[in-house]
Amino acid sequence: MKQHRLARVAEVIREVAAETILFEMRDPRVKNVTVTRAEVSGDLQHAKVYVSIMGSEKAQDLALHGLRNAAGFVQSKLGNRLKTRFTPQIKFVLDEGVKKSIEVSRLLNAERAQAAGSATDAAPDPEQAEEEAEG
């Protein structure tokens, strides 16, 4: 199948899943969920919807369990929007990319702060050095 068609179908799946989770689901377990991307198989039978869930490990597991239970509901909304022979079977997968990027950013900022702190300790203040040279 053409790659651009798969990309268009994946984008529609991502949009429908995001809108459904955000506006139509009433499951109290599903909180702080962001749909990051979707992948579709070549025959349009299966789709993986990648979600990022902020919070503790327990909250992530609970939200992912709620999403997996609501997969049929999301799939029915997708069937109303997609006009294909088959509606893809949806599987929700936890996307660790956002969480890892936040952690890397935090580590880089800590390293920069540490490097800036050690640089000011090692190098004397230019104004102070001038005053000492004059005096």
Image (tube, rainbow, N blue to C red):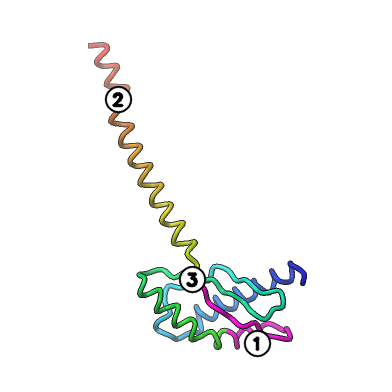
According to the picture, the residue beneath numbered tag 2 turns out to be 125
Q: Which of the two labelled residues, at mark 1 and mark 2, occupies the earlier sequence position? A: 1
Query: Mark 3: which amino acid?
Result: Leu
Instruction: Give, as a single range, the part of the protein colored magenta.
Output: 75-94
Q: Residue at x 39, y 47 (%)?
A: 109
Q: Residue at x 66, y 85 (%)?
A: 87
In the image, 97: left or right of 123?
Answer: right
Instruction: Report the front residue among 40 and 81.
Output: 40
Q: Residues within 10 Å of mark 2 (few under 14, many from 20)?
A: few
Q: Does 60 appear in magenta?
A: no
Could you tell me which quadrant the N terminus lies in?
bottom right
Could you tell me which quadrant the C terminus lies in?
top left
Q: Does 81 appear in magenta?
A: yes
Q: Residues within 10 Å of mark 1 (few under 14, many from 20)?
A: few
Q: Residue at x 29, y 16 (%)?
A: 130
User: x%, y% of residue 40?
Assistant: 65, 74
In the image, 85: left or right of 14?
Answer: right
According to the picture, the residue beneath numbered tag 3 turns out to be 94
Judging from the image, what secondary structure is the residue with disc 2 in?
loop
Query: Mark 1: which amino acid?
Result: Asn
Viewer-nearest of discs 2 and 3: 3
Q: Residues within 10 Å of mark 3 (few under 14, many from 20)?
A: some
User: x%, y% of residue 68?
Assistant: 49, 82
Judging from the image, what secondary structure is the residue with disc 1 in?
helix
> From the viewer's perspective, is residue 84 above or below residue 52?
below
Q: Which of the two labelled residues, at mark 1 and mark 3, occupies the earlier sequence position? A: 1
User: x%, y% of residue 26?
Assistant: 45, 86
Q: How far is the residue under mark 2 from the one under mark 3?
A: 50 Å
